[in-house]
Image (spheres, rainbow, N blue to C red):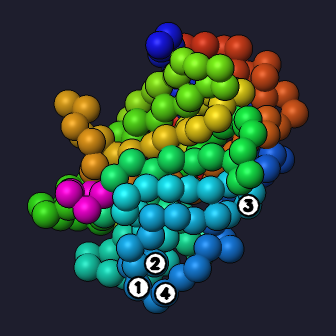
Amino acid sequence: MNTQLGIALVLGAGVAAANGNVVDFENAPGSGNPQYQNVSYLDSSGFEFIGEHFHTMDNFAIANGLAENGSRVYIGHEGGNLGRAITMTKTGGGTFSVYSLDAAETWIGDNTTYPNAWGVSVTGYFDGGGSINAVLQLDGLLDGAGGIADFETFNLTGFTNLIAFEFNGVEATGAPNRAFGVDNINTVPAPGAMALLGLGGLMMRRRR
Protein backbone atom coordinates (compact mmCIF):
# COMPACT_ATOMS: atom_id res chain seq x y z
CA MET A 1 0.00 0.00 0.00
CA ASN A 2 1.31 3.40 -0.96
CA THR A 3 1.32 5.85 1.91
CA GLN A 4 1.68 9.61 1.60
CA LEU A 5 2.54 12.06 4.33
CA GLY A 6 -0.10 14.76 4.65
CA ILE A 7 0.73 18.40 5.38
CA ALA A 8 -1.57 19.97 7.97
CA LEU A 9 -1.88 23.69 7.46
CA VAL A 10 -3.34 26.01 10.09
CA LEU A 11 -3.83 29.19 8.11
CA GLY A 12 -4.40 32.67 9.45
CA ALA A 13 -7.34 33.41 7.15
CA GLY A 14 -8.89 32.61 3.80
CA VAL A 15 -10.07 29.00 4.03
CA ALA A 16 -13.48 29.56 5.55
CA ALA A 17 -15.12 26.32 6.60
CA ALA A 18 -18.48 28.06 6.81
CA ASN A 19 -18.59 28.27 3.00
CA GLY A 20 -18.35 24.52 2.54
CA ASN A 21 -20.39 21.52 3.68
CA VAL A 22 -19.55 21.49 7.37
CA VAL A 23 -20.37 18.49 9.56
CA ASP A 24 -21.01 20.28 12.86
CA PHE A 25 -22.89 17.53 14.79
CA GLU A 26 -25.55 19.98 15.93
CA ASN A 27 -28.21 17.42 14.97
CA ALA A 28 -26.57 14.67 17.04
CA PRO A 29 -28.56 13.33 19.99
CA GLY A 30 -27.64 14.72 23.39
CA SER A 31 -28.25 13.29 26.81
CA GLY A 32 -27.40 15.98 29.37
CA ASN A 33 -24.46 13.69 30.09
CA PRO A 34 -20.81 14.17 29.12
CA GLN A 35 -21.58 11.81 26.30
CA TYR A 36 -24.32 10.09 24.38
CA GLN A 37 -23.70 6.79 26.10
CA ASN A 38 -21.72 4.04 24.38
CA VAL A 39 -21.90 5.48 20.90
CA SER A 40 -20.49 3.21 18.21
CA TYR A 41 -22.45 4.69 15.30
CA LEU A 42 -23.64 8.17 14.40
CA ASP A 43 -25.18 9.54 11.19
CA SER A 44 -24.78 13.30 10.80
CA SER A 45 -24.99 15.66 7.82
CA GLY A 46 -24.73 12.89 5.24
CA PHE A 47 -21.83 11.06 6.89
CA GLU A 48 -21.52 8.02 9.13
CA PHE A 49 -19.15 7.90 12.10
CA ILE A 50 -18.18 4.49 13.45
CA GLY A 51 -15.92 3.46 16.32
CA GLU A 52 -15.75 0.99 19.17
CA HIS A 53 -16.56 3.76 21.64
CA PHE A 54 -16.86 7.53 21.28
CA HIS A 55 -18.98 10.38 22.54
CA THR A 56 -21.14 13.28 21.51
CA MET A 57 -19.98 15.87 24.04
CA ASP A 58 -22.92 17.96 25.20
CA ASN A 59 -22.37 18.72 28.88
CA PHE A 60 -19.27 20.84 29.26
CA ALA A 61 -19.40 21.14 33.06
CA ILE A 62 -18.58 17.49 33.78
CA ALA A 63 -15.61 16.86 36.12
CA ASN A 64 -13.25 19.85 35.86
CA GLY A 65 -14.94 20.89 32.63
CA LEU A 66 -14.57 20.07 28.94
CA ALA A 67 -13.26 22.10 26.02
CA GLU A 68 -15.88 24.41 24.49
CA ASN A 69 -16.25 26.19 21.16
CA GLY A 70 -19.70 27.72 21.43
CA SER A 71 -21.49 24.84 19.73
CA ARG A 72 -24.13 22.58 21.30
CA VAL A 73 -22.26 19.35 20.68
CA TYR A 74 -19.07 17.90 19.18
CA ILE A 75 -17.66 14.37 19.04
CA GLY A 76 -14.56 12.73 20.49
CA HIS A 77 -13.66 10.60 23.44
CA GLU A 78 -12.38 10.89 26.96
CA GLY A 79 -9.17 8.96 26.38
CA GLY A 80 -7.58 5.96 28.02
CA ASN A 81 -8.75 2.46 27.24
CA LEU A 82 -12.32 3.66 26.68
CA GLY A 83 -11.45 5.72 23.60
CA ARG A 84 -10.93 4.36 20.12
CA ALA A 85 -10.38 5.74 16.63
CA ILE A 86 -13.44 7.18 14.86
CA THR A 87 -13.96 6.47 11.15
CA MET A 88 -15.98 8.77 8.90
CA THR A 89 -17.58 7.52 5.67
CA LYS A 90 -20.18 8.93 3.33
CA THR A 91 -23.68 7.70 4.09
CA GLY A 92 -24.60 5.21 1.37
CA GLY A 93 -21.02 5.08 0.10
CA GLY A 94 -19.05 7.26 -2.27
CA THR A 95 -16.00 9.48 -2.21
CA PHE A 96 -15.45 12.76 -0.37
CA SER A 97 -12.71 15.14 0.70
CA VAL A 98 -11.78 16.75 4.01
CA TYR A 99 -10.37 20.27 3.83
CA SER A 100 -10.42 21.32 7.47
CA LEU A 101 -11.58 20.43 10.96
CA ASP A 102 -11.57 21.92 14.45
CA ALA A 103 -9.85 19.98 17.22
CA ALA A 104 -9.00 20.31 20.90
CA GLU A 105 -7.98 18.41 23.98
CA THR A 106 -10.96 17.18 26.03
CA TRP A 107 -10.27 17.96 29.68
CA ILE A 108 -9.65 21.26 31.42
CA GLY A 109 -6.91 20.53 33.93
CA ASP A 110 -5.27 17.18 34.61
CA ASN A 111 -7.11 13.91 34.22
CA THR A 112 -4.58 11.19 35.00
CA THR A 113 -7.04 8.38 34.26
CA TYR A 114 -7.94 9.76 30.83
CA PRO A 115 -5.04 11.98 29.72
CA ASN A 116 -5.47 14.68 27.11
CA ALA A 117 -4.15 14.16 23.61
CA TRP A 118 -0.92 15.81 22.47
CA GLY A 119 -2.27 15.78 18.93
CA VAL A 120 -4.93 14.32 16.65
CA SER A 121 -3.79 11.76 14.11
CA VAL A 122 -5.85 11.84 10.89
CA THR A 123 -5.70 9.27 8.09
CA GLY A 124 -7.48 9.41 4.75
CA TYR A 125 -8.02 6.23 2.73
CA PHE A 126 -8.12 6.84 -1.00
CA ASP A 127 -10.58 5.36 -3.44
CA GLY A 128 -8.52 2.76 -5.32
CA GLY A 129 -6.04 2.16 -2.49
CA GLY A 130 -3.34 3.98 -0.56
CA SER A 131 -3.62 6.43 2.31
CA ILE A 132 -2.47 9.80 3.60
CA ASN A 133 -1.70 10.70 7.21
CA ALA A 134 -1.02 13.80 9.27
CA VAL A 135 -0.71 14.55 12.98
CA LEU A 136 -2.32 17.80 14.07
CA GLN A 137 -0.40 19.06 17.09
CA LEU A 138 -2.65 20.70 19.68
CA ASP A 139 -1.51 23.73 21.66
CA GLY A 140 -2.54 22.55 25.13
CA LEU A 141 -4.50 25.75 25.79
CA LEU A 142 -8.10 25.49 26.97
CA ASP A 143 -10.19 26.99 29.75
CA GLY A 144 -13.82 26.25 28.88
CA ALA A 145 -16.41 28.91 28.13
CA GLY A 146 -15.04 32.39 27.49
CA GLY A 147 -11.39 33.28 27.85
CA ILE A 148 -9.03 31.70 25.36
CA ALA A 149 -10.28 29.71 22.37
CA ASP A 150 -10.21 25.99 23.15
CA PHE A 151 -10.49 24.66 19.58
CA GLU A 152 -8.06 25.27 16.73
CA THR A 153 -8.91 25.07 13.03
CA PHE A 154 -6.59 22.79 11.05
CA ASN A 155 -6.68 22.95 7.24
CA LEU A 156 -5.62 19.82 5.37
CA THR A 157 -4.19 19.33 1.90
CA GLY A 158 -4.20 16.06 -0.02
CA PHE A 159 -7.18 14.53 1.79
CA THR A 160 -9.26 14.27 -1.39
CA ASN A 161 -11.10 11.47 -3.19
CA LEU A 162 -11.40 9.50 0.05
CA ILE A 163 -13.59 6.53 0.90
CA ALA A 164 -12.85 6.84 4.63
CA PHE A 165 -11.34 9.35 7.06
CA GLU A 166 -10.10 8.19 10.47
CA PHE A 167 -9.07 10.29 13.45
CA ASN A 168 -7.86 9.62 16.99
CA GLY A 169 -6.12 11.41 19.83
CA VAL A 170 -2.45 10.54 20.31
CA GLU A 171 0.38 11.36 22.70
CA ALA A 172 3.73 12.73 21.57
CA THR A 173 5.14 9.22 21.07
CA GLY A 174 2.25 8.39 18.77
CA ALA A 175 0.50 6.11 21.29
CA PRO A 176 -3.24 6.27 20.51
CA ASN A 177 -6.50 6.72 22.41
CA ARG A 178 -5.93 10.03 24.18
CA ALA A 179 -8.71 12.46 25.05
CA PHE A 180 -9.73 14.83 22.24
CA GLY A 181 -12.67 16.46 20.51
CA VAL A 182 -13.39 17.21 16.85
CA ASP A 183 -15.98 19.53 15.33
CA ASN A 184 -16.83 21.37 12.09
CA ILE A 185 -15.40 18.90 9.58
CA ASN A 186 -15.40 20.74 6.25
CA THR A 187 -15.82 18.57 3.15
CA VAL A 188 -16.08 21.24 0.42
CA PRO A 189 -13.36 23.82 -0.33
CA ALA A 190 -14.27 27.46 0.16
CA PRO A 191 -13.66 29.87 -2.73
CA GLY A 192 -9.93 30.51 -3.02
CA ALA A 193 -9.07 27.57 -0.77
CA MET A 194 -7.15 25.65 -3.39
CA ALA A 195 -4.79 28.57 -4.02
CA LEU A 196 -4.03 28.79 -0.33
CA LEU A 197 -3.55 25.05 -0.02
CA GLY A 198 -0.76 25.36 -2.57
CA LEU A 199 1.33 27.14 0.05
CA GLY A 200 2.76 23.84 1.29
CA GLY A 201 4.87 24.14 4.43
CA LEU A 202 3.33 27.39 5.64
CA MET A 203 2.42 26.92 9.29
CA MET A 204 0.30 29.48 11.08
CA ARG A 205 -2.58 29.26 13.51
CA ARG A 206 -6.10 30.56 13.51
CA ARG A 207 -7.78 30.41 16.88
CA ARG A 208 -11.46 29.56 17.23
Please provide the residue range marked out in magenta: 79-83
Calculate the distance from the C-alpha at mark 4 to the C-alpha at mark 3. Answer: 19 Å
Q: Residue furthest right?
A: 191
The x and y percentages for residue 113 are 13, 63
Say which element carries label 3: loop
For disc 3, the marked residue is 45
Looking at the picture, does residue 165 appear above or below residue 148? above
Question: Which mark is on residue 31?
Answer: 4
- Amino acid type of the residue that numbered disc 3 sits on in the rendered structure: Ser
- Spatial CA distance of label 4 from label 2 is 6 Å
**x, y percent for residue 128:** 65, 20
Label 2 packing within 10 angstroms: few (<14), some (14-19), many (20+) = some
Query: Which residue is tagged 2?
Result: 36
Q: Please name the amino acid that badge 1 sits on.
A: Asn
Q: Residue at x 51, y 47 (%)?
A: 87
In three-dimensional space, the C-alpha distance between marks 1 and 3, rounded to whole angstroms, equals 22 Å
Inter-mark Cα distance, 1 to 2? 7 Å
Do residues under tags 1 and 2 come within 8 Å of each other at their CB atoms?
yes
**Residue 90 appears in the rendering:** yes
Q: From the viewer's perspective, is 124 left or right of 65?
A: right
Q: Earlier in the sequence, mark 1 or mark 3?
A: 1
Distance from disc 2 to disc 3, alpha carbons, whole Å, reads 17 Å
The amino acid sitting under disc 4 is Ser
Q: What amino acid is at disc 2?
A: Tyr
Q: Find residue 33 and name its label.
A: 1
Contact check, label 4 and label 1, Cβ < 8 Å: yes
For label 1, the SS is loop
